[in-house]
Image (tube, rainbow, N blue to C red):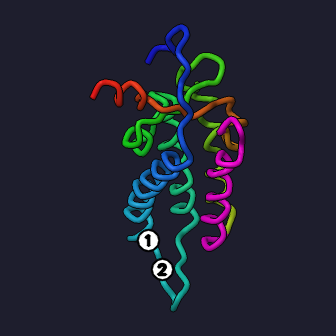
Amino acid sequence: MSGPEPGRVDLLATVGQRAIARVVDWIVVFAVWFAILGPVAETNGDDVSVPAWAAAVAVVVVLVYETLFVAWRGQTPGKMLMSIRIVDIADGEPPSVVMAVLRVAPVAGIVAVLPGQIFPIVLVVVHFTAGFARDSRGVLDRLARTVVVQTRRPELEAGAL
């Protein structure tokens, strides 16, 4: 995609759009995790354990999924579904691979080090900090110098009806 058109003001993605996109992406990632971890998981009563290599693969899945999609087109499948994308705040282009990694590395780290019951809560807090910022930029956006914008213009679509 090319940069923003001269004089165009992109509409910021809403927290609702971002939340739905994230849930869709989590479903995709969890499906891959279950495909990888399911066959090697061992259960002992209520406890489930997986080999360290499988847990490492799960972390890599998060890194690769998010990094590739964000650096390639600024959109994960969830963001495509919600018509939003991540752009570099300076030029409106998808973030570089380095910035895409910076944007997802904290999430992968959270998945790697926090117990299963705690990491979803921390992920929600990290991802939805954008809802409390005036410029709709969350912790990860600030780290990677990005912003999440809408890819379709509701005011133009409404006028076309």
Crowding around mark 2 (Cα neighbors within 10 Å: few <14, some 14 to 19, many 20+) is: few
At 40% across and 70% down in the image, what residue appears?
Answer: 38
Q: Quadrant of residue 136?
A: top right
Q: Quadrant of residue 81?
A: top left
Marks 1 and 2: CB-CB under 8 Å?
yes
- Say which quadrant the N terminus sits in: top left
Residue 133 among those drawn in magenta = yes
At 38% across and 70% down in the image, what residue appears?
Answer: 39
The kind of residue tagged 2 is Glu
Q: CA distance from mark 1 to mark 2?
A: 6 Å
Query: Could you say where residue 67 lies in the image, as x and y percent from the top left?
Result: 53, 37
Q: Which mark is residue 40?
A: 1
**Residue 25 left/right relative to 138:** left
**Which residue in the rendered view is the most extreme toward the top?**
6
Range shown magenta: 115-136
Query: Could you say where residue 45 lies in the image, as x and y percent from the top left?
Result: 51, 91
Closest to the observer: 52 or 114? 114
At 60% across and 16% down in the image, what residue appears?
Answer: 91
Q: Which mark is residue 153?
A: none
Q: Which residue is mark 2?
A: 42
Crowding around mark 1 (Cα neighbors within 10 Å: few <14, some 14 to 19, many 20+) is: few
Query: Could you say where residue 109 lies in the image, as x and y percent from the top left?
Result: 67, 53
Residue 152 among those drawn in magenta = no
Task: Say what secondary structure mark 2 lies in.
Answer: strand
At 46% across and 14% down in the image, what residue appears?
Answer: 2
Closest to the observer: 27 or 82? 82
Query: Could you say where residue 3 lies in the image, as x and y percent from the top left?
Result: 51, 14
State the predominant SS element of the stretch in magenta.
Answer: helix
Task: Say what secondary structure mark 1 lies in.
Answer: helix
The kind of residue tagged 1 is Val
